[in-house]
Amino acid sequence: MKLGVEPVTKLTTNTRLDRIEIKLDSLAEAMVSLARAEEKMTGIKEDHDRMYDRVNRLSQKLDDIAGKVDDNARTVQTINKLFWVAVVAATGSIMAQLWM
């Protein structure tokens, strides 16, 4: 009777070990997949950080440009006013010369 029991036990043990080995292989594949996903997430985070810094720099440049545009607008307004003062003064002096 011991002969009949031993082969069944060996077969069952081998089957169990094979299943455990298959499960370990699938766990190893899952760990590799997780590691790859983590690497991708790290890369995405680094890209996000670089883009965030770039957007911040562009925002600062836009703020600088907006300040320069405001300064230029004030200068143009002043020049425009001076131009019209000169036109009125020239017109006034021409009219004064014609009437006198």
Image: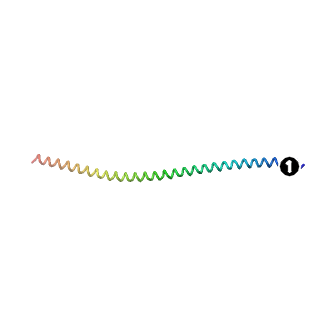
For the point 41% across and 53% down, which residue is it? 60
User: Dot 1 corresponds to which residue?
Assistant: 6
Callout 1 secondary element? helix
Expressed as whole percent of the image width and height from the top left, the position of residue 89 reads 18, 50
Residue occupying the point 34% across, 52% down = 68
The type of residue carrying mark 1 is Glu
Q: In the image, residue 9 lies at what x, y percent?
A: 83, 49
Q: How many marks?
A: 1
Determine whether, in the image, residue 88 is placed left or right of residue 5: left
Left or right: 48 as drawn, with respect to 13? left
Nearest the viewer among 99 and 59 is 59
* Horizontal arrangement in the rendering, residue 25 relative to residue 62 (left or right): right
Residue visible at 23% across and 51% down? 82
Q: Residue at x 73, y 48 (%)?
A: 21
**Number of residues whose C-alpha sits closer than 10 Å to that of mark 1, classed few (under 14), some (14–19) or many (20 or more):** few
x and y, in percent, of residue 1 in the image: 90, 49
Residue extending farthest to the left is 100
